[in-house]
Image (cartoon, coloured by chain):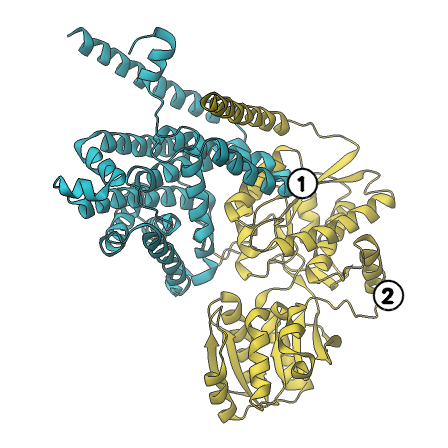
Amino acid sequence: MQEKKRNWLSFGGEVLILAAIFTIVQYAITAGLLNQYYQINLASMVINIILAVSLNLINGFTGQLSLGHAGFMAVGAYASVIMTNMLGYPFIAGLLMACLAAALAGFIIGVPTLRLKGDYLAIATLAFGEVIRVVLQNIDAVNGPAGIVGISRLTTWPWLFGAMLLTILVVVNLVNSSYGRAIISVREDEIASELMGINTTSYKVLAFVFGAMFAGLAGALYAHYFYIIKPETFNFLKSFDILVMVVLGGLGSTTGAVIAAMFITVLTAVLQSFPAIRMILYALTLIIVMIYRPQGLMGNRELSRQTFGRIWGGRK
Amino acid sequence: MKRRSGRKLAMLVMMTFVLSILAGCGGGGSETQDEQINVGINVELSGGVASYGTNSKDGMMLAIEQINAAGGVLGKQLNPIIKDCKSLPDEAMSVSANLVGEGIVAQLGPLTSGNVQGSTSVMMDNGIPLVAPAATAVNVTVDEKTGDIMDYIFRVCFIDPFQGTLMAEFASTNLEAKNAAIYMDASSDYGKGLAKYFKETFEANGGTIVTEEGFVKGDRDFKATLTKIKGHNPDFIYIPGYYEEAAPLIKQAREMGITAPIGGTDGWDSSDMVAVATAENLNNTYFTNHYSSQDTDPQIVAFVEAYKAKYNGKDPDSFAALGYDAVQLLVQAINDANSTEPEAITAALATIKDFQGITGKMTIDEQHNPVKAGVIIEFKDGGQVMKARIQP
């Protein structure tokens, strides 16, 4: 009884903290305290967080090396822009369409390729990402290589915050559910979990579809913030950028993915004036982390109220 | 022991993170100085098209140096603020917002059309003019759907359709070609757009397009299509595309015995062209470009010499020349407006007439495009020779 009450209390506390973050940032934007530069970087930060957290579900928790995340992002971006800009539906319809289209793409790609392992899967997903890009380049209805210009800016802070929250909540709860246990068991030992009666392929596909869906959501938010999308933006280098965030944060840690996404975004923004140093520092950070913390910044641990409880209250 | 050092390192990384945020906050609020004119330079210094951005920035810096040495503009020195947009449109937007925060009166760059379009919304929101050195896509300055002019976006380069028209004029007038074949890069809008305008003008001049073929980026074997083209026996072949494909294409065409003159675009302007296609095969080929560093015009000679002196003998390419012109055009506008207010500069940019740049004399038209000449360059024994300057 006592335990339950405390849980409710801390849940209430979490909601309060989140509401406070949301309100403070919203106030800062409306009151003009955050200039455009900070707003733009805030948007890329949130979009990167969604991308990193969703890729972490595939690469970190399920242990399947996917290099096609930018491809799903492209699917979401184009699907949403077709809905809003070309067909005139409201933004929410664009977001839903983006999720649906990307999830579907994830399913279509996932079913045949997730039977592959390790390097083979990496190559297959890498190839898929490139196929998406080349296909988009050759569709005249979406302007081919020149891309779509003049997308209305519909992505606002409430949308960004809501989408980020939704992504993190779904991923965390999925991982902590019985499905999540099965997904992690696939990562730990595929043969053993198969012996325990777990349908490994279907769990892998499940994780893949969820990961792809949120990448699509991120793509839709991206498209409606940055005014222009073109196939070249979603090339394999974009996939690697997301992968770097996941590895830096720690494979299998949602907290790590969030922290790394924030870190990389800030690093990129701060070093805009020093392109040469940026490339060196970027590489150096990765090398140092990989030497001293090969498991990433957070390893597979999470930051939660239990962690804070341990630090401040000494309670478990 | 090992674990502890790991933890220390994690702390260190976290500290860097926090510090970098603080540094970011500090950097945003630098005040503008009255005696200086802040000019934002938002170019691609890393990423896919880093060479465009770097060369263009070199051209811009040369111009700024010369202007400052001569006493500046309106008695004030130009203060360039250079930032890298990583060849990405979203990064270009972020950089623009950053520059606006630092109090710039105008922005120069980025180079490619897509990155300029990424930057556009920030410039429009804040009412600060942007001068693009080399963004050639039509919809950079005009919204193609609504026909609205982008009020604050200008450029110093000619637009894509003009190059196609230029080569068609040259082919039908100077080379007296009647039957032309088109073999375009069908994987880029650039290739397709140029082919379309070439065809329109060439046919209007009484010529016939005997066949239209396409290749895609990355192709290396063109023999099958070339055999087909050879069967049509054209007296001119137009290849709008980039040098990566054009060079092996020309080599194969000449090896198959196609002797007809071949025409191309500014995408051919690369030293790799001669290295891959060889000097002999390139004879009797021509391409359109923004300017030629071989031009004997005294203004161009002076520019080329100054550029070479500043950058260890490097030959200024079109991007360098266009970057140089972008600065000069902006300075002209500031002088015309007699003000460093972005609105006044924008109004002055829109009405510039007969501005003499390195890449030709230009007048900004109502769509914010310069009306200017283009040049035809001929490959002769491995060297580039200026063949003609064609005024629209």
Instruction: Tell me what residue is drawn at x 36 percent, y 22 percent.
Output: A303
Q: Position of residue A252 (x, y in %)?
A: 33, 34
Q: Which mark is residue B298?
A: 2
Kindly state the secondary structure of the residue where label 1 is placed.
Answer: helix
Instruction: Name the residue: 35% across, 21% down.
Output: A18
Q: Residue at x 31, y 34 (%)?
A: A167
Residue at the spot of label 1: B342
Using the rendered image, report if marks 2 and 1 lie on a common chain: yes
Say which element carries label 2. Answer: helix
Q: At which x and y percent is residue B163?
A: 61, 71
Which chain does the residue under circle 2 lie in? B
> Mark 2 vs mark 1: which is more N-terminal?
2
Label 2 crowding class (10 Å Cα cut-off): few <14, some 14-19, many 20+? few
Q: Is residue B108 left or right of residue B181?
A: right
- From where the camera sits, is residue A80 visible? yes
Residue sitting nearer the eye, A102 or A27: A102
Tell me the tag on residue A84.
Answer: none
